[in-house]
Image (spheres, grey):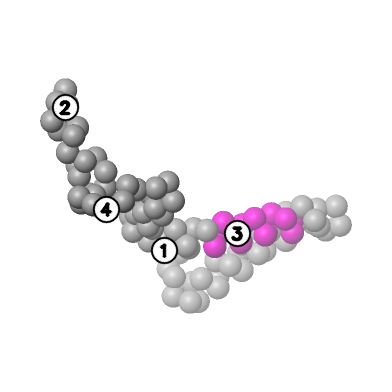
Amino acid sequence: MIKLKELIKESKYAFGRKFGEPLPTIETTTERHKVNINERNPDVELYKKLGKIGTDVGNLVKKYEKMADTDKALSTFMVGLHSMLVKMGYTRFK
């Protein structure tokens, strides 16, 4: 159980705030949280970009599914993507 004396010490529970500094706001707390997420996972930007590519491919398939053989086109695309990655030196999927 936390004692009252421990709760009164703001520096432990208020992001290391020193005496005289302003209280943290929602904006500063949110910004610190975003920075912490990016520091913990440096691949966030890559995941976002790959997710956008996946969404774009899905939208293209949806657009052309009534006019073309989308299964064959996607299969060919994936094989081509794989061979392009291998040519670039990425051998994890060999």
Nearer-the-camera pick, 72 or 35: 35
**Badge nearest the viewer, 3 or 2:** 2
- The residue labelled by disc 2 is 4
Nearer-the-camera pick, 61 or 13: 13
The residue positioned 38% from the left and 61% from the top of the image is 42
Q: Was residue 57 drawn as part of the magenta stretch in this picture?
A: yes
- The residue labelled by disc 1 is 92
| In the image: residue 55, left or right of residue 9 | right
Instruction: Of the two numbered discs 1 and 4 on the same chain, state the one appearing first in sequence.
Output: 4
Instruction: Of the two numbered discs 4 and 3 on the same chain, state the one appearing first in sequence.
Output: 4
The amino acid marked with disc number 4 is Glu
How packed mark 2 is, by other alpha carbons closer than 10 Å (few <14, some 14-19, many 20 or more), is few
Pinpoint residue 68: horizontal percent, then vertical percent: 83, 58
Q: Quadrant of residue 61?
A: bottom right
Q: Alpha carbon of mark 1 to alpha carbon of mark 4: how far?
A: 50 Å
The residue positioned 49% from the left and 58% from the top of the image is 47
Q: Alpha carbon of mark 3 to alpha carbon of mark 2: how far?
A: 49 Å
Pinpoint residue 70: horizontal percent, then vertical percent: 76, 56
| In the image: residue 38, left or right of residue 46 | left
The residue positioned 72% from the left and 55% from the top of the image is 59
The overriding secondary structure of the stretch rendered in magenta is helix
Q: Secondary structure at mark 3?
A: helix
Instruction: Of the two numbered discs 3 and 2 on the same chain, state the one appearing first in sequence.
Output: 2
Q: Alpha carbon of mark 4 to alpha carbon of mark 3: how far?
A: 41 Å
What residue range appears in magenta? 49-61
